[in-house]
């Protein structure tokens, strides 16, 4: 990165924050080089600390579906803030928000607002364990559900054995009750339920994975999770923090016509403010304090400023928005594929709506084992080529890129041209 301003800022930041960032993926460790620092975001564009402009394909990792600094969202936040930033007491806004969530996600009969996707997933799992009296939870390799101890776990020695920590600081016993299976492996899931279904408190899944790169569910996979869970008294949890209001207005469960027992939401429903939620079947949510024995709390949960941003965002999630996102996503996918083909570079693009990933790998990516075959070094060089041409792409092979309402043909064609040029440089 030749941007002297970011370089100077990064030198200061590294003294103060681990890796100079407030979240690891931003540090560019996966792509090499140093992170760009930004000072402004508007529409489909980011403005670097040095004034350089970039087409943004990260969108704050999903929330900016309307484009950055949407006028209605900004106004809603300003007006709410002027009436007090947080009451620490109930407000009508929280009722309106819960009503909107239930309209969007009919499976969410009752919900609780929290401030991050990590909180939402952690709480949903605690509800599942409290409601079933069971300890074992199931997740899938390559899926990320926030940084709660029980979820920073990788597969143990054998398939479907107990997990081992995937981070320092996670006690063995915290990981032991988490079983990790390959994503899209319905046979492995069926085998686990056949032998241990009575032990399983929950199965949590990204219904379209974003956190190993964009990996869609194989036909029948999600349906099997919901069906087998219901048959064994296990709680099916769709982690729709990323897919919620992204792959459809009602998330993956609308797109695929499913009703999981519980749902976790975040990102888009907060419009860029700290706002997430978990919820689902009433009998489950009635286990949550103060109604039931499962404790969960939060100082800023449902605060009026975050909720106002979320409501102003939800109000603009129109059918025309999703038609536009689909059209621009398809245009980008076709352009990226053609650029790689013309340069003779082995690459696969996988996309659901306006979330997509270009994998530097031959053939489809159905699981972590497939994704792990990607050429990370090539991705890093391609990412640098995009950056030098004014395109800000997620700085990791194992993330999804996101488009917004403000990405038009000009922005898409700029990304396509930059990618084609960067592909030609890969040689
Ligand atoms: P947060 O705690 O970051 O709000 O949400 C955690 C989370 C839960 N579930 C899914 C499916 C998610 O994608 C996330 C967070 N996503 C990452 C991007 N892969 C956020 C970016 C970051 O960690 O800085």
Image (tube, rainbow, N blue to C red):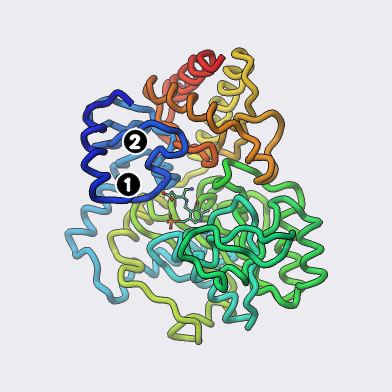
At x 41%, y 60%, the residue is 116
* Residue 298 visible, this angle: yes
Q: Within 10 Å of the Cα at label 1, are there few (<14), some (14-19), or many (20+) other Cα atoms? A: some
Going from N to C along the chain, the mark reached first, 2 or 1, is: 1
At x 39%, y 33%, the residue is 56
Up/down of 393 relative to 121, above or below: above
At x 44%, y 34%, the residue is 57
SS at mark 2 in the image: loop
The answer to whether residue 310 is left or right of residue 403 is left
Between residues 248 and 262, which one lies in front from this camera angle? 262
Up/down of 104 relative to 361, above or below: below
At x 59%, y 80%, the residue is 283
The answer to whether residue 404 is left or right of residue 400 is left
SS at mark 1 in the image: loop
Callouts 2 and 1 close, C-beta under 8 Å = yes
Query: Disc 2 designates what residue?
Result: 35
Q: Within 10 Å of the Cα at label 2, are there few (<14), some (14-19), or many (20+) other Cα atoms? A: many
Label 2, label 1: how far apart the Cα atoms are: 9 Å
Q: How far across and down, in percent of the image, does residue 263 sit?
A: 56, 63
Query: Disc 1 designates what residue?
Result: 21
In which quadrant will I find the C terminus? top right
Q: Quadrant of residue 199 in the image?
A: bottom right
Between residues 106 and 340, which one lies in front from this camera angle? 340
Please give the count of numbered marks on the rendered protein. Answer: 2
In which quadrant will I find the N terminus? top left
The answer to whether residue 268 is left or right of residue 424 is left
Q: How far across and down, in percent of the image, does residue 375 sit?
A: 59, 31
* Residue 260 visible, this angle: no
Q: Quadrant of residue 79 in the image?
A: bottom left
Q: How far across and down, in percent of the image, does residue 329 sit?
A: 54, 32
Between residues 236 and 182, which one lies in front from this camera angle? 182
């Amino acid at each position: 990165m030749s941007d002297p301003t970011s370089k100077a800022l990064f030198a200061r930041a590294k003294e103060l924050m681990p890796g100079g960032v407030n979240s690891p993926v931003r540090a560019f460790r996966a792509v090499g080089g140093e992170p760009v620092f930004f000072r402004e975001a508007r529409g489909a564009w980011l403005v670097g600390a040095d004034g350089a402009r970039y087409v943004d394909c990260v969108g704050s990792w999903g929330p900016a579906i309307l484009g950055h600094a949407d006028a209605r969202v900004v106004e809603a936040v300003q007006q709410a803030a002027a009436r007090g930033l947080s009451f620490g007491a109930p407000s009508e806004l929280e009722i309106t928000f819960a009503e909107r969530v239930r309209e969007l996600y009919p499976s969410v009969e009752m919900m609780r607002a929290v401030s991050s996707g990590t909180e939402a997933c952690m709480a949903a799992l605690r509800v599942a364990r409290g409601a079933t009296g069971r300890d074992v939870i199931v997740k899938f390799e390559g899926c990320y559900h926030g940084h709660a101890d029980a979820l920073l776990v990788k597969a143990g020695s054998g398939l479907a054995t107990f997990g081992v920590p995937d981070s320092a600081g996670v006690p063995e016993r915290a990981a032991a009750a988490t079983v990790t299976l390959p994503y899209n492996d319905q046979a492995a899931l069926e085998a686990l339920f056949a032998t241990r279904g009575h032990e399983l408190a929950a199965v949590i899944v990204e219904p379209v994975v974003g956190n190993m790169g964009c990996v869609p569910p194989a036909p029948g996979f999600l349906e099997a999770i919901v069906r087998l869970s219901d048959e064994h008294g296990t709680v099916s949890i769709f982690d729709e923090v990323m897919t919620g209001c992204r792959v459809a207005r009602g998330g993956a469960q609308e797109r695929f016509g499913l009703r999981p027992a519980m749902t976790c939401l975040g990102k888009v429903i907060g419009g860029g403010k700290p706002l997430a939620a978990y919820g689902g079947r009433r009998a489950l949510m009635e286990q949550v304090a103060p109604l039931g024995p499962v404790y969960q709390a939060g100082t800023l949960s449902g605060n009026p400023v975050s909720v106002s941003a979320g409501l102003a965002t939800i109000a603009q999630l129109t059918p025309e928005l999703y038609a536009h996102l689909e059209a621009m996503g398809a245009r980008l996918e076709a352009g990226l594929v053609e650029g790689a083909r013309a340069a003779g570079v082995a690459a696969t693009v996988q996309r659901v709506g306006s979330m997509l990933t270009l994998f530097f790998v031959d053939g489809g990516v159905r699981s972590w084992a497939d994704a792990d075959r990607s050429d990370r070094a090539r991705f890093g060089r391609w990412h640098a080529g995009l950056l030098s041409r004014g395109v800000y792409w997620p700085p990791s092979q194992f993330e999804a890129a996101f488009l917004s309402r403000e990405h038009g043909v000009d922005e898409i064609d700029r990304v396509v041209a930059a990618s084609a040029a960067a592909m030609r440089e890969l040689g």
